Amino acid sequence: MLLNCDLGESYGRWTMGVDAAVMPYLDQANIACGFHAGDPLTMHHTLVLAAEHGVAIGAHPAYPDIVGFGRRSMTLSSAEISANLHYQIAALDGMAQNLGLALTYVKPHGALYHDMMADDAVRAAILQALASYHRPLALMVQATLQAAAHRVEADAAGVQLLFEAFADRCYADDGSLLPRSQAGAVHNRERMLAQVAQFTQDSTVTTVGGHSIPLQVDTLCVHGDNPEVVRSIAALRALVDGG
């Protein structure tokens, strides 16, 4: 099981996260492409940092909402979604190629990610955007009870899926993430480690209602916002590696 993290989300003089500290523990870096965070120099620095640690590179595109950090849903046509994705992916892809690096996957950010999982039309537009890109890129989606159906959709579009679970988030009984507005939506360190152990050992997660549900997981999302979180990620790395 891989570890992924959203990175490169600083902008100008504003700093977000502790990318240099968390990068050594990761397998995949989801790099912001400028529409919710990130700027050209931040993108460059994050690519170089990933290369130094042998971390796979993924584009982290969003709705064009830098003021709202990409967390506000927008009503876009399928053509607009496709064009917005191509613009962001191509920017990071070009910068990566200039450094001799290869972009391998895409993980939508924030509201675009949640809309992709909840809205068939948005998900179809994103799949079509990747299918029409000039070379193959995998799409990272949330691992849910609908994973088999999502795989059928992706196979029809010719797009590989990477199923993602969240190390520190509580799950609702339907396999979705418990909204952050609800108490207990974000696990403390002890509960997070227990949940990851369950993922790795049983391929299941225990929901807020106490139900154990199966989830197919390829990669775990972790967050690198502060030094305390980085210490937790180090423990997760050891757990996933069996140490």
Image: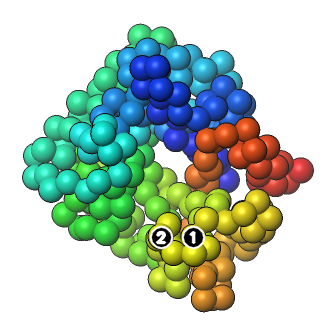
At a point 13% along the width and 52% down the height, the residue shown is 76
Q: Would residue 119 appear left or right of 218 to someone viewing this image? A: left
Kindly report which numbered mark, 1 or 2, lies closer to the viewer in this rendering. 2
Figure check: 177 above or below 13: below
Query: Quadrant of residue 136 in the image?
Result: top left
Examine the image and state in which quarter residue 149 appears.
Answer: bottom left
Colour theme: rainbow
Residue 181 has which mark?
Answer: 2
| Helix, strand or loop status at disc 2 | loop
The disc label shown at residue 27, or none = none
Instruction: Answer above or below: position of 131 versus 190.
Output: above
The answer to whether 21 appears left or right of 170 in the picture is right
Q: CA distance from mark 1 to mark 2?
A: 7 Å
Q: Can I make out residue 161 in this image?
A: no
Task: Check if mark 1's residue and mark 2's residue have beta carbons within 8 Å.
Answer: yes
Q: Is residue 39 visible?
A: yes
The residue under the point 38% across, 17% down is: 40
- Determine the residue positioned at 13% across, 44% down: 80
Q: Position of residue 92 (x, y in %)?
A: 37, 25
| Disc 1: which residue | 185
Residue 41 rendering spot, x and y as whole percentages: 44, 15
- The amino acid sitting under disc 1 is Ala
